[in-house]
Image (spheres, rainbow, N blue to C red):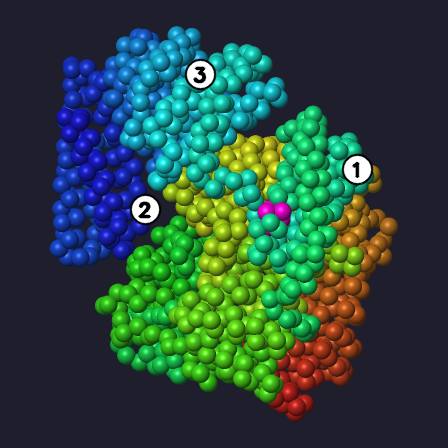
Amino acid sequence: MASSSLTCISSILDDMQLLENKCPDSTDHDFASLKGGLRILRPFLMSARKWGNNDDENLAALLLGTEAAISKTGEKIHSFCLRLELEGRVSANDLRTLVFDCMTDFPSDEDIKGWYFVFSYRSLKQSSNNSLMKTEDLIEFMDYLLESFRDDHYDIGVLFEGVEGPTEGLEEKLAFLKNFISFVALHGIKDEQLGPLLAHTELIAVNAACLSYWSCFGADDELYLSIRDATMEGLQKIIPVESHVHETCVQALIASKLSARSYVEADEQILREIIDSLLCNICWILKSGTCRMISIKDQLQMLCDGLRSLRTILKEKEKPNKFNEKMRDLTGLVICDAGLVFLTLSLNANNDGWVKEMDLVPLDLLERIKLIKATIAEECPGTSPFNFPKTNALGFVDSLLKYMMDLKSPEAGTAALVNHRVQTVQEELAFFPSFLGKIVDLCNEDEELQSLWDRVVYLAYRVEFLMDSLLVGDIVDSSSISFDSIVEEIKIIKSEALKISDSKRFDVKVKEVTKTLHYQPSQVFKPTINDLVVGIEDEAASIINRLRRGSNQVQIVPIVGMPGLGKTTLAKKVYNDSNVMSHFHVRAWCTVSQDYHNKHMLLQILTSLDSKLPDKYFEMSEEDLALAVKKRLQKNRYLIILDDIWDTEAWNGLQATFPDNGDGSRVIFTSRYHDIAPQDKLDKEPHCLRPLTHDESWDLLTKELFPGNLPPPELCELQMQIVEICQGLPLTIIILAGILKNVDRQGWKEVVESLSSSVVSSTEQCTATLELSYNNLADNLKPCFLYFGAFPEDHEHNLDKLIWLWVAEGFAQKTQFKSAEDVADDYIMDLISRSLITVSKRRSTGGIKTCRIHDLLHEFCVRRAREEKFFQRVSGYDELQAFSMQHNLRRLCIHSEPEHFCKSRLFAPTIRSLLFFSHDERYKKKMFHLSLIFGIFKLVRVLDLSHISLGSTVPRELEFLVQLSYLAVLGIMKSIPSSIANLTNLETFIVGTFSRIVSLPDTIWNMKKLRHLHIRRRSRCYSTFRLPTNNLDDAAQLCNLVTFSDAILSSWENVDKILRKLPNIRKLKCSTELLESDYPASGASDKILVLDFLSQLESLTLKAKGYVQCQFEFQFSSTIKKLTVSRFYFPWSKISAIKNLPNLEVLKLLRGAFEGEEWNMEEEGFPKVSFLKLASLDIVKWTAFECEECFPSLRKLILEDCHYLEEIPPCLGNSSLEIIEVSDCPYSASFIQPLQEEQMDMGNTHLKIFISSREMDN
């Protein structure tokens, strides 16, 4: 009966998957408990079959009830599937009722838990040489057990909560036993030959199943704890270490090796799985510290590299022709030998604590691996050593030379490693930048030059690899032989290059080469945040008409069209139209894209509805968020924009969230596809966005190139031709304008000639335009542009973080007069001027805060980066499993769920950058072990793990990544270990945390290169760094630190000392906990927070933690341009410390910065302040009776949550005031009208005033 029940469970799971796929309103949570319960039942049914006795009447009754429940559940689920086929749709409530109904049929969990205890006891009494299960049954049991482990609904980590010992990797160790048995069984090894191994595996498996079930259904009682402790020793020794079990494994591998079995294609999965298990366990030995001898480590690394190559080949769906039966047979021999090596290593490691020198990897094993790899390499050009990144190769050679020069400086601390051989390499290599610069434009036309170019650049990458490997200790100084060979190779290539340089043929070619386009000096450029809107007024009017008229039921209005037509621009215009804003009670914008998550979309909607969304929402489940959105939309006429939607599943996941209030609510889709919206929700056909007319195209191009002017007469004919080329596609026009605005008339002619050679579709023309724009970028801009492809589509880029990444990647280098960050900022402006990226949000200072890239440009970046080997982008579980590392892979970008990333065991030792992205909120607080990964990526310089939690501590293994320049981590850590100072090259350190305070170690003062130190709160609580205060008098200064947020200053005695450790800080955010008891006893005159010695400080944010019970003075630096103050509750008289700051441009006085009902500006002040924000203050009257020039430079005023404010000075800003935004100020009518009249009298007719009220949803 157990077999039929197991089959029935499989059928039920298949039917449930069908229901999930076809039910638009269902979520993973709807079925999770039932699916998990069924999966975890399968090991129990098999255990009962093997360890249950015939006279166990209670067990028989339990099994009868369980099997009946399974059968009944199967009937119910199958009937529901049939109903779905007939009706075409079922509600989410019906699904939940079905699941609940099925769950009630099953027997008590307590009964099953009790019998598992019995099975565990009986298995312990079983003979150590005999198994009750046959091989195939045991493999099936292990498969079921491992599948239950992988169920997201049950966290197997709770098994070992609070337990010390090597229990990590339980799933992988169980998988090894299963895969090992499968492999040797493939060679005909009989059950009687495997007796001790099968018995050992059976014992481990049933105890693991027992603990698994107990942990899922109550793991907090004493009986569970006693079972866990009793079986812990066995679980810690999953890998066979008992002599008779170990010997059985060894003999099974030897017999398999001698069996001369020929493999077929169907065997490849078993081969792949055992290789995967061997890799996992050998890597564990390498990283566990038991392997001390460098020679052994090197050989094991070679073995791992070879096994990964074999795994990659076996994963390929289309194998190379030369991977035939012979290659499979060789692979089998490699697995046998690798297994023998591992068994020997693991036995010694467990018995003696370390791996001995005698445990060497057999040479014939490594030779077999080389033979397989070489055979495949003949057919796979991707394995070529010249597979290095092609983007800005000349820039790479330049930066390498600078890097080698920096290593020789005393500050680098690497002088002992940089011997005369390295210096010789540098001197010889210095010849090539000028030579490469001469031939850069000739390589495409000359194979000899291209070959020379490739050899030089490949040589540079080899030099860098050797240098970095030497620095991280992966190779010893005897590697000087490698440097000597490189010097010889450089001399050979240099000789060839000199011959070419001296040849007449080369001189002619240099004279003939011309730039692709003729550039003129770039003009002063100020990027705009607004989309240029041309030709869509009638389209917008049509959409608005559909929104305001028609049915009272919820209707979808799709805006569809090819990429680049302006769908999002049109939707924005409609969304911000005054008639639309007044017609709908609430509006929300949600960007969907291809890679979406329901929870992320729901949070977007809520944040759009309420910009100050309370913290609690970010901790809610998806179901609770959906209810919150629904509640917020009920009884309101709403407009929701779902931008860039790719399939119906995104709508299906949100549809139930949008209530039909019968009030004319609307949802706008923007999509490339016509059939996204369900027919029953459409009032009309989708709105198909048309191309621009000829005149509209002319106007758009003119506005981009000559804002406010007409095109010069000599360019009109060329502009006419360009308009024809663009075929009415706005994106093509804008990108072409980005090229044309930087070239002269000859350049215009070349653009026309390059794009009008053939008649193609508008989409192909847009792609051709992108190619032209990219090809004519300066080489140093190309990597910056392609880097956008590493991020998720529609990602909004924080400019600071993007710049720090570029600097860490080496894209922007400091110059004599500019920092690397300022150079990178210039690159940003250049890309914006070329219309390749767009401004998304601005800072209050007017600078750029965030930027975006069009999804069509994003697709181009991903494709071009792949072609140029610039980075490898891996998305989702399937791609992770099929990952094949490119030779010389430099950057790896992972887009997946964190657990899939951790289990993938990626091996890419050459990478310098690893970026990980995940929007799945389920995992944000779940800890993942990444120790093995850190051991592999030793050369990494950029490591962004801000989307995967490291838990409560920063792993020690991080301290060995000494090349790191950029590090971003996430966790619940409350302190940073002192070993962080080992990262002597670290320039940017970002900590994302759910803790309120993170303590920095004393060693932080030793991190001389640190430039950016930031804490990012991952919930809405305020998070800060606590700086160390021990031995401050002797601590070094952080002279290179330029941005720091957020620091907590908690001791008056140490405030001055700490701040003086930051002499060159430019941007500082900090909070204070300065209490009365902390003040010096020398009198009130000493109560001054002195900041005027910070001579580089430009941006300062000050926040008091708690209520400030005592008052003190500020002495600000005169260099400050932006100041934000909150929670000090100072009297308004103390604002005198701020008003005369000569360079202050932005002032934000937020919650409780000052208190008191009246702020009377008696004197002139704030001479340069152009942006002023007052928020959450108790002020009633703000007057300036005796002040003729009140904020004379003010351009923008924001008043927010000032619930008692009744009066403001009407003469604000004289006539400079441009915008006033007022929100949640109930008495705004009393002061807005007088101010508006005063401004009109002063001639300010362009003043814009926006008044809004936000309703908090509690």
**Who is closer to the viewer here, 503 or 1246?**
503
Labels 3 & 1 near each other (Cβ < 8 A): no
- In the visual, does 998 lie left or right of 154? right
Name the dominant secondary structure of the magenta segment.
Answer: helix
Check residue 542 for magenta coloring: no
For the point 41% across and 59% down, which residue is it?
A: 593
Residue that numbered label 2 is attached to: 29
**Residue type, mark 3 in image:** Leu
Q: Total label count?
A: 3
Mark yes or no: residue 854 visible: no
Q: Earlier in the sequence, mark 3 or mark 1?
A: 3
Q: Indicate left or right for 304 with 176 as reference.
A: right
**Which comes before the other along the chain, label 2 or label 3?**
2
Q: Is residue 1186 left or right of residue 893?
A: right
Q: Which mark is residue 340?
A: 3
Residue type of the residue flagged with mark 2: His
Disc 1 crowd, CA 10 A, few/some/many (<14, 14-19, 20+): few
Residue at 53 percent across and 81 percent down: it is 719
Q: Which residues are magenta?
A: 450-454
Name the foreground residue: 229 vs 926: 926
Question: Where, quadrant-wise, is the N terminus in this rendering?
Answer: top left
At x 47%, y 55%, the residue is: 863
